[in-house]
Image (spheres, rainbow, N blue to C red):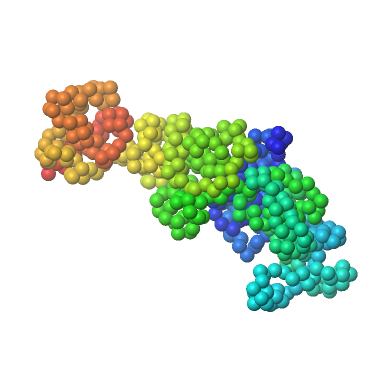
Amino acid sequence: MTAKPVRVRFAPSPTGHLHLGGARTALYNYLLAKKTGGKFILRIEDTDQKRYVEGAEQEIIDGLRWLGITYDEGPDIGGPFGPYRQTERREIYQTHAKSLVDKGAAYPCFCSAERLEKVRQEQQKRKETPHYDGICRNIAPEEAARRIAAGEKHVIRLRMPQEGTTTAHDHIRGDITVDNKNFDDAILVKTDGLPTYHFAAMVDDHEMQITHVFRGVEWLSTFPLHVNMVRAFGWEEPVWIHLSIFLKPTGKGKMSKREATDALKDGHSIFVKDLKDLGFIPEGVNNWYALMGWGVAEDEVMALDQMAQRFSIDHLTPSPAAINFQKLDHFNGTHIRLLPTAELARRLKPYFRADGLAVDDDTLLKITPLIRERLVTLDDCLAFGAFFFKETVQPTREDLIAKDLDAAQSAAIARRAYQILEAQPDISHARSEAPMRAYVEETGLSPNQVFGIIRVAVTGQKVSPPLFESMEVIGREKVLERLKKAAEILEN
């Protein structure tokens, strides 16, 4: 089914932040287009103006670009099937709605909101499921045309089949059959002339020649409705693919706002913008959520081009996938270590500068290999590398005192380390480590005691990248100065 080039679309509504579910839908569209040499389209479904959020469209675009999910046609770059915002396609929907009315597959409905509410309340009193009673279904076309010409407000409804069943095929889940009596005559065009989401999406998919429709499993309930719309026109149906749902980390239910807030406090998020701000990299994020619903090994490490080579809609699974933030950390750290040194250094630089540090590229390139193995997110670089760019560090007296030693003994070690290192022609790793280890041997002290004091003295912290490699980058003058200062702190 994917041998020919496909045309696929990601069609978000600009009503909030781009989240994992939307990002995964976009990613699968992108991968299938790349796999088949097809086209991937971004379409903005903004007909629900009441829920429109200013800036949301740009956040979607920025999020996709950050993830590396590039589209071939879209609202900001154009294309042969535009416009790519639904509010700019009003005439297209009205033309198609009129064609359905003309063939009897749809009809104008003049019911007011007040009448519909009264009908709903009466149905509830009778303990019936609220539904449209179809009173306008049999209005003669001539009368409907007269009332429209007179300016009477109306919507356009689809004339749904009232008997029998509708069967539609989902590529992951197989045939889905529902009783037609369970469906209302759905509204296609609202009183303001704008289409409903359901109608606009089906028209746009046809007009833009979409071959495969990826969407969330929450749309299964309206799946038969959409299929009936397509069939009312006599159009060829796309391949429908309803993706698995994401569950909260416990595996029980969808993420709530409270749980999303708690995750953010712990340095994680379900929103793409947050993940970027938290120091995650797109390679790790893509790898993480791509495998939630894709039947490959859950620890498979892949870049985008590798995903595109392996992707197949036949391997997607319907089973719900629990969000696992530990796996996000794993994939992110793994992809950080796969980045070339120069590229990783480029990505780390903004975090150092945002912390008010003056970063020179030569030092940055030297320290990047030293801190790489310790990074889970990019902002971890501050914990392991900020001291490289500081003129001075501020170790505490308590941190400088080694385990099982007192201040005087620790000061003596700092003084002796100063003497040993000052006697060396340089402070390179090769020059400094051997004499310091010899000192440990001759004194009977533990490496943790001696090197721990030196580490705190020269870095200002108990945890750092490899000590002697770090000292080489810091430089002879600063290392000796910091050791002397540490001894003075301990002696005072």
Q: Is residue 391 at least partly visible in the picture?
A: yes
Whether residue 315 sits left or right of residue 464 in the image: it is right
Q: Position of residue 71 (x, y in %)?
A: 64, 42
Whether residue 381 sits left or right of residue 231 in the image: it is left
Q: Position of residue 285 (x, y in %)?
A: 50, 42
Whether residue 258 sits left or right of residue 410 in the image: it is right
Is 429 or 37 nearer to us in this picture? Answer: 37
Whether residue 190 sits left or right of residue 375 in the image: it is right
Q: Position of residue 112 (x, y in %)?
A: 73, 74
Is 287 or 475 nearer to us in this picture? Answer: 287
Q: Position of residue 234 (x, y in %)?
A: 81, 51
Q: Is residue 353 above or below residue 53?
A: above
User: How many labels sit on residues?
Assistant: 0
The structure residue drawn at horizontal position 53% and vertical position 50%, both measured from the top left corner, is 246
The structure residue drawn at horizontal position 18% and vertical position 45%, both measured from the top left corner, is 398
Image quarter (top left, top right, bottom left or bottom right) of the N terminus: top right
Image quarter (top left, top right, bottom left or bottom right) of the C terminus: top left
Q: Is residue 482 at least partly visible in the picture?
A: no
The structure residue drawn at horizontal position 52% and vertical position 34%, both measured from the top left corner, is 302
Q: Is residue 255 above or below residue 363?
A: below
- Quarter of the view holding residue 145: bottom right
The structure residue drawn at horizontal position 20% and vertical position 43%, both measured from the top left corner, is 399
- Quarter of the view holding residue 348: top left
- Quarter of the view holding residue 332: top left
| Residue furthest out toward the right | 142
Q: Is residue 400 above or below residue 106?
A: above
Is 485 or 413 nearer to us in this picture? Answer: 413
